Amino acid sequence: MSYYFNKGVDCSFSEAVERAKEALKAEGFGVLCEIDVQKVLKEKLGVDFYPYMILGACNPAYSYRAIQAEDKIGLMLPCNLIVQEREPGQVEISAVDPLESMRTVDNTRLLQVALEVQKKFKSVVEGL
């Protein structure tokens, strides 16, 4: 089983980032952090890299339920979504599959939350 969902989108990189944020918002997620990997690698290592943005998404209600079920699960939060443009005009959006990432934790209450979040993340990616 794959640990992510992905989809190619027909738009610019910056438009894909904005579309991803809007799709997350529509499913009740906020973006807690944005990591511009291209910029960080240029600044810290002096290397050129293709456009690659990590969006750290959070839905407070699901996060709260997950932490109630498993107090160390914050190590796996927030749920990440990435936007990358490996070639000009070829933009791909990928989201973590929370169910797969949390299967390593033996906790059925947590897996129920992960299943609900999985459905929402699939909806985000499929709707782009």
Image (cartoon, grey):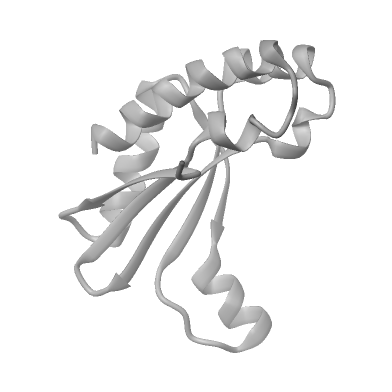
* Residue 86: % across, % down: 33, 72
Q: Residue at x 67, y 35 (%)?
A: 77
Q: Residue at x 76, y 19 (%)?
A: 67
Q: Residue at x 57, y 81 (%)?
A: 42
* Residue 13: % across, % down: 30, 60
**Position of 69 compared to 86: left or right?**
right
Q: Is residue 19 above or below residue 10?
A: above
Tell me which corner region of the image, top left, top right, bottom left or bottom right, holds residue 44: bottom right
Q: Is residue 8 above or below residue 108?
A: below
Kindly give the residue lying farthest to the left in the view shown: 10
Kindly give the residue lying farthest to the bottom in the view shown: 46
* Residue 125: % across, % down: 32, 37
**Position of 23 compared to 43: left or right?**
left
Q: Which quadrant of the figure contains the C terminus?
A: top left
**Position of 9 compared to 125: left or right?**
left
Give the total of numbered labels.
Answer: 0
Q: Is residue 51 above or below residue 43?
A: above
